[in-house]
Image (spheres, helix red, strand yellow):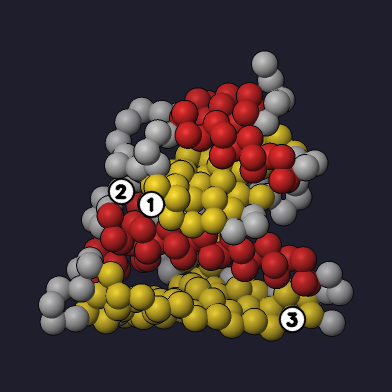
């Protein structure tokens, strides 16, 4: 048993075709909205997000209009693919269409699919925010794996209370049961419910010298692991 899936998102953004292509098909561009650090070279996309370090093959490359990357299909049928179509508009904006497809194997695919869907919604909304507010710029990705959480309602409450002091005036651009995304003038700040239990911070900083060590300390203190 398993589950094949396909989902489509489409939006018009006030960014040029070139800026959209930079965001979806280059390492520094993907670094600025997706997760971890990314490299696009030699027909592949390589991601490093903690211990998760997949390599995807580029199966469509037609700059600046069509880009697709997909994982190898594993023995149990598991795979995922991301496809982007880019179309310019006469008034200077761009329509971006993204199709996510794949297959999840096993009897427990539903929990994984829920986590992937909720996380994917955050990544899409981050891309939209990036193209609306930071097009053409390059962010420093900051990735922090915080404490394992036993009570997620309490954890999100602590994050909400502490973030008001940490990022005064931040705009919430996305929230669901597993994720939170905020935007300031200097970056985009995101918190995710890790599939195996930790609170994860996956930020994109355009200005300032804040570090992963700074956010590690903040996250540990906020969630009560260190005093």
Q: Nearer the viewer, residue 132 or 87?
A: 132
Q: Which mark is residue 138?
A: 2
Looking at the picture, tell me which residue is in the foreground, 134 or 53. 134
Mark 3 neighbour class, 10 Å CA radius: few under 14, some 14 to 19, many 20 or more: some
Position above or below: 76 against 145? below
Cα–Cα span, label 1 and label 2 = 6 Å
Residue that label 1 marks: 32
**207 and 68: which one is in front?**
207
Structural crowding at the residue carrying mark 1, measured as other residues with C-alpha within 10 Å and reported as few (<14), some (14–19) or many (≥20): many
Q: Quadrant of the N terminus?
A: bottom right
The CA span between labels 3 and 1 is 30 Å
Position of 187 relative to 68 (above/below):
above
> Is residue 67 shown left or right of residue 64?
right
Give SS at disc 3. Answer: strand
Separation of disc 3 and disc 2 at Cα? 36 Å
Q: Which residue is mark 3?
A: 3
Q: Residue at x 67, y 31 (%)?
A: 223
Q: Are discs 3 and 1 less than 8 Å apart at CB? A: no
Write the residue at 36% across / 58% down: 129
Secondary structure at badge 2 equals loop
**What is the count of numbered marks?**
3
Q: Position of residue 96 (x, y in %)?
A: 34, 76
Q: Where residue 19 sits: x, y (%)?
A: 24, 64
Query: Eyeballing the image, is 180 above or below 13?
Result: above
Residue in the picture at 76% in, 50% down: 196
Q: Is residue 179 left or right of residue 209?
A: right
| Residue reaching furthest to the top | 227
Q: Are marks 1 and 2 in contact (CB under 8 Å)?
A: yes
- Observer-nearest residue: 181 or 95? 181
Q: Of the residues under marks 3 and 1, which one precedes in the sequence?
A: 3
Q: Is residue 13 left or right of residue 31?
A: left
Q: Earlier in the sequence, mark 3 or mark 2?
A: 3
């Amino acid at each position: 048993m398993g589950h094949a899936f396909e989902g489509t998102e489409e939006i018009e953004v006030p960014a040029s075709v070139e800026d959209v292509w930079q965001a979806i098909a280059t390492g520094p561009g993907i670094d600025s909205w997706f997760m971890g650090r990314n490299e696009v070279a030699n027909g592949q996309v390589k991601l490093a997000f903690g211990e998760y370090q997949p390599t995807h093959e580029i199966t469509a490359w037609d700059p600046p209009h069509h880009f697709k990357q997909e994982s190898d299909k594993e023995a149990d049928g598991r795979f995922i693919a991301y496809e982007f179509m880019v179309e310019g508009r006469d008034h200077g904006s761009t329509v971006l269409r993204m199709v996510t497809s794949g297959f999840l194997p096993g009897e427990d695919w539903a929990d994984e699919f829920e986590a992937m869907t909720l996380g994917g919604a955050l990544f899409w909304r981050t891309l939209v925010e990036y193209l609306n507010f930071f097009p053409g710029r390059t962010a420093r990705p900051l990735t922090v794996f915080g404490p394992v959480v036993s009570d997620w309602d309490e954890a999100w409450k602590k994050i909400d209370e502490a973030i008001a002091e940490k990022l005064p005036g931040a705009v919430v651009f996305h929230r669901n049961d597993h994720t939170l995304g905020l935007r300031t003038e200097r970056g985009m700040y995101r918190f995710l419910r890790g599939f195996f239990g930790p609170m994860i911070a996956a930020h994109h900083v355009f200005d300032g010298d804040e570090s992963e060590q700074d956010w590690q300390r903040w996250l540990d203190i906020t969630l009560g692991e260190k005093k």
